[in-house]
Each structure stands twice: as structure tokens, then as C-alpha cells.
Amino acid sequence: MINLAILISGRGSNMTSILSSIQSRKISNVCPKVVISNILDAPGIEIAKKQFGIPTEIILPDGKKGWDYDSKIVNILKKYNVTCTDGLICLAGYMKILSKEFIDYYPFRIMNIHPALLPSFPGLNAQKQAIDYGVKISGCTVHFVDSGIDSGPIIIQESVPVYASDTEETLSARILEIEHKVYPNAINLMANDKIRLKNRTVIID
């Protein structure tokens, strides 16, 4: 059984899809332990509490950066038994860059979803980057987090077409639909020992 923590900064739509998938048993062998936000009034916090009954924690930066801030998160994760051996941390619209110390503490135990087909268009505004570049196919990527920007080993990718009429908003909405399917799938694979690493390549058994 994997103990799950979800880190959010906003509405938590991917958080909701993950917790709904656990509730409906589309994800097995996962126990959601805590949802953590760095934003006081993040809407996802109320959803986690009221809709799913999941414990929540708010850790405001208060000017702290890097490990000075992340060490507080690690202390909370330990409190909820989300460990480096049987825990999983999912970033779901979490708008802070994790410190190297945090990532090293949870090697290949932190997942993120990015609204582009990595390694293309990492970082912010990926959908706008795709439209500006003129690509015909975009999508989303679930990956393990490493110390780079959206550069960790890729777990799952799913594509969507990009239309000539697309705006950043319409493409974002189309990608978000598949994010809500792909992220739970990746977590379920992890929880059921279907993922292994060969060098930096993720093998799905």
C-alpha cells in the first residue's frame, strides 16, 4: 500500500481526478494521507476536506525558499507516514520548484504532470509555447521529478491534436481532459509495481 500526498497551489482539478479515481477504485493500493498547499485560500483545500474527507495542511512560504521551506513539507509528510520507501508525492498544479534536498530525500517518489509532450515546451505556459511554435500535436506528460525543470524520466504521455483555430485556452482545456485520465493511470501503475527504471527510461510491465 502506497501512502499518498498531493501538493497543490490552486483549484486542484488533477487532485480531484486522483482522489475520485481512488474512491471509485480505478486506482488500487493507494491510501491518500494528506493534501498540502502553499497558498492559504487554494480552492482545492476545501474540496479535499469537504468532498473527500482528506486531511489538509497549509504551509505558507513566509519568505522561506528552497530547503528552508521544503523541510517543513518533509516534516508534515513524515507526520502522515509518507516516507521515501512506501510513499508517493504527486504535484497537482503546485507552483513552486522543489529543492534538490527534497527531491533527493524522495528519489523517484515524486510525480508531476505537465501540459506538453516533454521534452518539448517545459516550464510555464506550455500550451502557449505549443501554439506559438505551430505544432500540430500536443498533449501531456506524467514524469518523475528530478532537479531540472520538467526533465525527469517520462512515465506516460498522451497526445491531442492542435487545431488552427486553437487558443491557449481551448488547447489547455483539451489537454486538461486527458490529464485527468493519464495521471491516475500513472499512479495506479506505480502502486501496483508495474513501473521500473532502466537508466533513465521508465519500463512499464
Image (cartoon, helix red, strand yellow):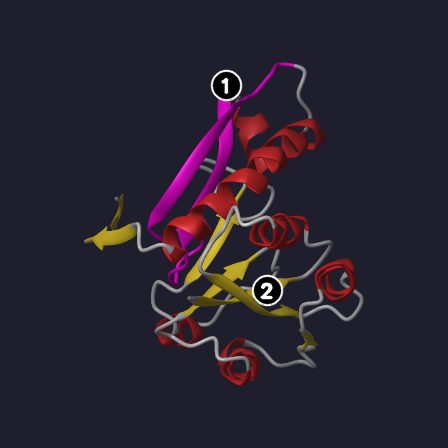
Residue at 38 percent of width and 76 percent of height? 105
Q: Which residues are magenta?
A: 137-164
Q: Position of residue 69 (x, y in %)?
A: 57, 80
* Extreme residue in the left direction: 198
Q: Is residue 34 above or below residue 20?
A: below
Image quadrant holding the N terminus, namely bottom left
Check disc 1 and report its element: helix, strand or loop.
loop
112 left or right, relative to 177: left
Q: Position of residue 131 (x, y in %)?
A: 58, 26
Q: Position of residue 171 (x, y in %)?
A: 64, 28
The kind of residue on which mark 2 rests is Leu
Q: Quadrant of residue 34?
A: bottom right
Residue that label 2 marks: 7
Q: Quadrant of residue 76?
A: bottom right
The kind of residue on which mark 1 rests is Lys
Which of the numbered marks, if any, corresponds to residue 136? 1
Q: Is residue 182 above or below residue 22?
A: above
Q: In this orientation, which residue lies closer to the viewer: 110 or 95? A: 110
137 left or right, relative to 106: right
Residue 145 in the magenta stretch? The answer is yes
Q: Is residue 7 above or below residue 196?
A: below
Which of the numbered marks, if any, corresponds to residue 185? none
**What is the spatial separation of the Cα atoms under label 1 and label 2, in whole angstroms?**
32 Å
Q: Position of residue 53 (x, y in %)?
A: 71, 66
Q: Earlier in the sequence, mark 1 or mark 2?
A: 2
Image quadrant holding the C terminus, namely top left
